Amino acid sequence: MRRAPGLDWAERVLGGPVLWMGLAALTLFAVAPFVWVLLASFKTRAELYATPIVYLPASLSLANYVEAWTSRLTPFSRFFANSLWVSSVTMVATTVVSILAGYALARFRFAGRQTFLLVFLATQMFPAVLLIAPLLSQWYALGLIDTYQALIYSNFSFTVPFTVWMLVGYFESIPRELEESAMLDGCTNFGALCRIVLPLAAPGVAATAIFAFVASWSELLFAITFTSQTEMRTLSAGLLFMVGQYEIQWGQLSAGVIISTIPVAILFTYLQRHLIQGLSAGAVKG
Amino acid sequence: MARGATLTAPVARPLLSRRARELLTGYCYLIPVILALGGTVLFPILKAMQMSLYNHVLIRPQEYGYVGLANYARLLHDETFWLSLWNSFQWVFGSVLFQFLGGFAAALLLHQSFRGRALVRTITLLPWIIPGVVVALIWEFIYQPNYGLLNDILSRAGVMTERVAWLANPALAMPAVILTNVWRGVPFFAIMLLAGLQAIPGELYEAGRVDGASVFQRFRFITLPMLKPIIVVATATRIVWTFNYADLIFVMTSGGPANATQITSTYTLLQAYSNLDFGYAATLSVALLLIMLAFTVVYLRLTRGLESVA
Amino acid sequence: MNERRILSRRALLKTMAAAGTLTAADLKWWEEPLLRPRRAWGAAPVRFQFSVPEPKRNALVESLVQRFNQAQKDFEVKVEFVPQAQARQKLITSVAAGSPPDCCQVWDNWVGEFEGMGALEDLTPKVKDWKHYKDVLPLAWQTVTVKNKIASLPWVVTNDALYYRTDRMKEYGLSAPKDDWGFDDFLAFTKAFTRTDKNQYGFGMRGQGTWAVLYATEFMYANGAQVLKDGKVVINSREAAEALDWYLDLFRKHKVCPPSVPTDGWRGIVEGFGRGITNTYIHNSGSAEEQKGFVGEKNFSTVPLPLGPAKKRNSFYFSETLTAFNKGKSREGAWRFMSWLMEDEPNLMYTKGLGLLPSRKTLFERPEFMHDPAYQGFIKSFPFSIVSPYLAYAGWGGKIDSEGVPLFQQALVGKLSSKEFLDKFAEVLTKNMA
């Protein structure tokens, strides 16, 4: 009878020094840029532009944050509120739209279903730059330039196809029998969706919702094309124009970078587990 | 669909058959998505195709008019377009290759069990989730010639005597933006491959060990084949995404210096923003679309082949 | 009778209600900007786009607008600050969409493009009756005249000179450049100013934006080159190529410029000097007040550009304009506001605040402009300053930016020779002589 041999030499090296060195390198590579910017956000002007470089700020001064948050020229408080609003509305609307569509595509065998699925897949392949010029003239024609609606509607173009695709996968993994028995008890189709399917699919729905939020939070090209007034800018657009027009104030900019990162970082820690499952579920099917 | 069979209550025959009602409900569920994507994707794409047939330069309203395929003819003779395609190729190839290698290594590491794994996972996956403009600015700051991190490290290490302007040097700008994109994209591959690794049944490895396969052999004959489908899918998704992605380069170099980092998607943006030539910008974006569709068709063929093998 | 059908109708309604979340985004309450300017009752609104927002200018413009709104009751000006990078695009798209602002502040080299779109209010008749018409410098009128029509009011004029650090000059034992210095002196001066070990460079060359080409052209003029001769574009002459080679070699060969040149625009060169990385740079007088804050009033000075081998030199005048659109909703309000900005007090407030020069003679000749050492380089350049030759054709303004600068960058990084660049550039100019 054969026995599994103990750890061989290669395994011990791989599991020991290589693993630890790899992890250290990986963490450093991922984290160093953040640390650099985080440190810069506390530095004074003199510290930022010193030769040779000063790595550690003399004090943890929050001056850059206060300035960025309250500045009249680049009011990050306003940008933050704009981003929050645009991303939240996009998230809610996207989720509602894609629950309905995902459910329909997962449950009903109607003509054109395959085409629909293919369209959602193909839409994810479309370059955002393709939409810029036509959407710009469309929003101009509708008088939606410098409004939240233009941004929210435009965001659908990249959130909806992906979330529908992901939710179709989730819904298909939920046994059909549960709804059927519910419907026998007098539930409507919609009732069954709300009372039976959604609670079961809740983690998946949450993941897609957060995806929609994070994707809209990061969106840049639509935000700079369809808005031009300072008070309508999102964080991404605000950051970009902070570079373009004034002295590149790396202190304030770093503070802005940190401010923009925190919400998505928090969401991401929550999302991570679901996203891994969801992505692989959707992707393997893809 | 079989559920109706058990319905015994004597109801009057509904106006529509159950099947028809079900379909109707299904279609109703699709109305919002049709509106949402019709208005923001479908109609604009048709509009872009129409725009590409017009001379539509905003600063020359007098010359607005239908020009047939003139914009496409211009595209074929546009040196910068061909250059941008070549740059796009370098950008996609460099980014995806190194993202894949880095991501694979990261996934293998993160798949091991060690203390603080959850924390390390979250931290290393962060670069993927933060806004593109933030990534671009962080790295612009790192590359800054006079008070940036990279020059300082290299000169302290004694590698470099003269300050280098990474983004202003045509030979270095492309590698610099690719490195930034690699930083951003490694977590994507890490997440995908990690999910794939977790799905491989442990018994396979056990069996391999029992058969005396070394760790490298197990990797070669168990891990790789099991991951193949997910590798193909993730790579293809990433290729498409990287090809279309403009934010990073747009923020960091705007395609400069001297078009050294001008990829097709930033060139399209430039035509729309700077030259305000909407006709030609639309033509470029339609060309982008066609390239991506061609790629998608090949990709779908490929994955279908894979599925039948698996 | 059929509960199922009733329910399914309700389900449908619910579905539609859910979809209604989309339309709910049409509510108006969040559309109002947080900061809403006070509005005088009954005053007609006038939209004014200001295109160089930076802290100092914004504060100045806001206080000017406030004064105007308090000084009269008929109009209420609302200023829209649009970043320079977006300003031209925004104006052109809003003109194309038929809803331009009533008036705007832009540069003279953009005006031709708007004229070409047929979007401008012809100010000629109003200007001819205007009380300050004769007081505005003729060259200032020249910068805003397109096809014999006065297209804008020249808010300020300015020309180019060289800023240099006087404190570091003394530190390194250099002597101040003479007013009639030459190319060789310039090279020696900037070389002596280059201390790579201290991260200091002799010359902050501009590599991005329209003026990257304009500053280079000034050096070509110093060698006897011209943009136009007998109605033909001759910028690709031998003299031009020689001078350009010499100019670009400052970066390519002598390395007296920081490596970041190809990405340095307006902010890049001003900041580079302000942070002590470069010791000289070429700019108009508009950054003088800013540098007083950055490096200190006593630590810098200005000097005219050097004479070229042809013993010639030119500095180019250009103006920041006030321009009105013919599709604006309040054309009278636009004129009232623009002409008010040209009055003594508002004009002095703006020009002096920034270091730009007033376009009206009576203001221009005041001692605060004529005797400030920071302005000496500009004032000494007046005798040989000319209106920018690139204002000759309306179609050139935008093309220098969109086609000229990318070509220039290729020459800068050595992908094109100077001659090749100038040939291609001349072709671009010739094509757009409309």
Image (cartoon, coloured by chain):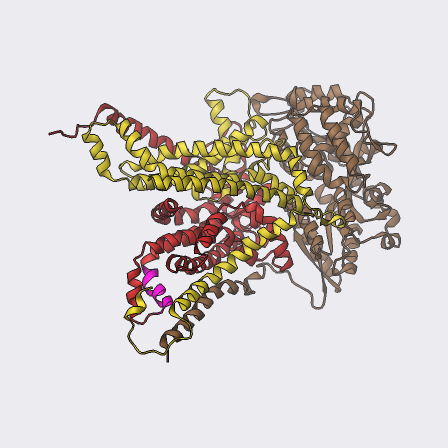
Chain colours: A red, B yellow, C brown
> Where residue C246 sits: x, y (%)?
72, 21
Q: Is residue C363 visible?
A: yes
Image quarter hosting the C terminus of chain C: top right
Magenta stretch containing residue A191, yes or no? Answer: yes
Residue found at x 59% / y 34%? B84
The total number of labels drawn is 0
Q: Is residue B62 left or right of residue A230?
A: right
Question: Closest to the observer: C46 or C237?
Answer: C237
Q: Residue A59: tell me if it is visible.
A: no
Residue C168 image position (x, y, % from top left): 64, 25
Residue visible at 29% across and 39% down in the picture:
B116
Residue beneath the point at 73% across and 39% down: C399
Considering only vertical position in the picture, is C363 above or below B175?
below
Position above or below: C93 against B20: above
In the drawing, does residue B1 fall left or right of residue B299?
left
C81, B49: nearer the viewer: B49
Span of residues in magenta: A188-199
Q: Residue B253 falls in which quadrant of the image?
A: top right
Secondary structure mostly seen in the magenta stretch? helix
From this view, report whether residue C217 is shown above or below residue C254: below
Q: Is residue C191 left or right of residue C119?
A: left
- Quadrant assignment, res C1: bottom left
Taking the view exactly as shown, the residue that stands out farthest to the bottom is C1
Against A209, residue B104 (above or below) is above
Task: Please state which of residues A265 and C422 is positioned toward the viewer in this rendering.
Answer: C422
Find residue C265 and report its horizontal and vertical position in percent: 65, 35
The image shows residue A261 at horizontal and vertical percentages of 45, 45
User: Seen from this angle, which residue lies furthest left?
Assistant: A1
Question: Is A167 part of what is drawn in magenta?
Answer: no
